[in-house]
Image (cartoon, rainbow, N blue to C red):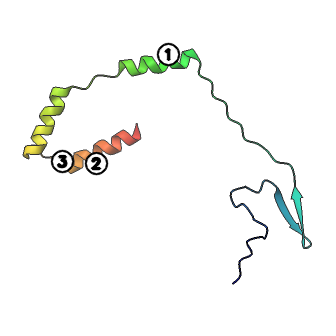
Amino acid sequence: MKIDVNGPVLNPLIPDRGARQVSNGTIAVNESVTEDRTTFHSDSASVQALTSQAMQTPETRQTKVDALSQSVSSGEYKANAGEIAEGILASEIM
């Protein structure tokens, strides 16, 4: 196989924007191209609502986290698989 380095180069990264329709062995190119647009608006009311919600979340109770971590590490904490499954399903429903 011979490669012609001076031949035409097609760029595969450029998308084909025209819709094509094949009819009677000919290809018709539809030049109407639509463009997607997105705009972002941040109004102060939604920012304040999100800030308020974040401020109302409880802080981590580090002493409880440390105690639970220690009991898991030492093997004292025995997890009940059924209760874990119920908790997961209950959280998915809400």
Type of amino acid at the residue the image marks with label 1: Gln
Q: Quadrant of the C terminus?
A: top left
**Residue occupying the far bottom of the picture:** 1
Mark-to-mark CA distance, 2 and 1? 36 Å
Q: In terms of sequence position, does the residue under pointer 1 or pointer 3 come before the other?
A: 1
31 and 7: which is toward the camera: 7
Residue 12, image x and y in percent?
A: 70, 61
Q: Indicate left or right for 74 with 87 as reference.
A: left
Residue 34, image x and y in percent?
A: 79, 45
Q: Residue at x 30, y 22 (%)?
A: 58
Query: Would you place residue 93 above or below residue 6 in this image?
Result: above
Residue annotated with mark 3: 80
Query: Would you place residue 40 above or below residue 34 in this image?
Result: above
Residue 93, image x and y in percent?
A: 40, 40
Residue 85's label in the rendered image is: 2
Q: Secondary structure at mark 1?
A: helix
Total label count? 3
14 and 61: which is toward the camera: 14
Residue annotated with mark 1: 48
Type of amino acid at the residue the image marks with label 2: Ala
76 and 40: which is toward the camera: 40
Q: Secondary structure at mark 3?
A: loop
Q: Residue at x 15, y 27 (%)?
A: 63
